Image (spheres, rainbow, N blue to C red):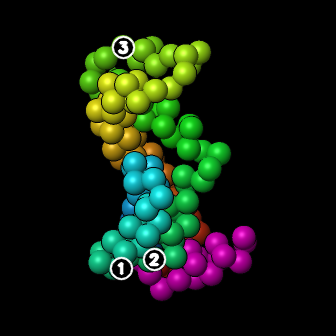
Amino acid sequence: MVDFFNQNLVKTKDNNFKIVGSIMFGVFMGIIPLWGYQLITAIALAYVFRLNKLIVGVAANISITPMIPVIIYLSYLTGGIVLGTDISKLPFNAGLSVELFTTNIKQYLIGSFVLASFVSSLIGTFFYILLLFVRKEHR
């Protein structure tokens, strides 16, 4: 893990903006609701946007299996905040149904894009500051 970080972030010839852009794009693609297609879509678009494909792929894996319920729930909550709806409507004690899904899909979709934008910006800011200290010659 240390070798990966050292070789692909610290010693790469890419500038800090390209590295941070790759991280942010990967995180964004990992959160938006393209379940099952996030990684392939992220890498294909990284090729189009000339980003670091390896970094995009690693960052897109934020949606590993244990994180999926957290991402879905936070997306739903974020959508409720953005739309101004009651975020306590999702019953956890009742069974999930197609009807429940269809009535909440708009809130979830909007929330997922807002959450993806927020989290990718937050992580991008963190890594930009980190890279300023770690990669002094590649600013």
State which quarter of the image contains the N terminus.
bottom right
Residue occupying the far right of the picture: 2
**Image spot of residue 73 (x, y percent):** 50, 32
In the depicted structure, whether residue 16 falls above or below residue 37: below
Looking at the image, is mark 2 or mark 3 earlier in the sequence? Answer: 2
Q: Which mark is residue 47?
A: 1
Report if the CB atoms under discs 2 and 1 are less than 8 Å apart.
yes
Q: Residues within 10 Å of mark 2 (few under 14, many from 20)?
A: many
Looking at the image, is mark 1 or mark 3 earlier in the sequence? Answer: 1
Which element is circle 1 on?
helix
Q: Which mark is residue 86?
A: 3
Q: Which mark is residue 53?
A: 2
Give, as a single range, the part of the protein colored magenta: 1-18
The residue under label 3 is which amino acid type? Asp
Report if the CB atoms under discs 1 and 3 are less than 8 Å apart.
no
Instruction: State the residue at coordinates (38%, 41%).
Output: 112
Q: Residues within 10 Å of mark 3 (few under 14, many from 20)?
A: few
**Image spot of residue 72 (x, y percent):** 48, 37
Q: Is residue 27 visible?
A: no
Left or right, residue 133 beside residue 3: left
Distance Cα–Cα, label 2 vs label 1: 7 Å
Q: Nearer the viewer, residue 67 or 119?
A: 67
Left or right, residue 136 beside residue 4: left
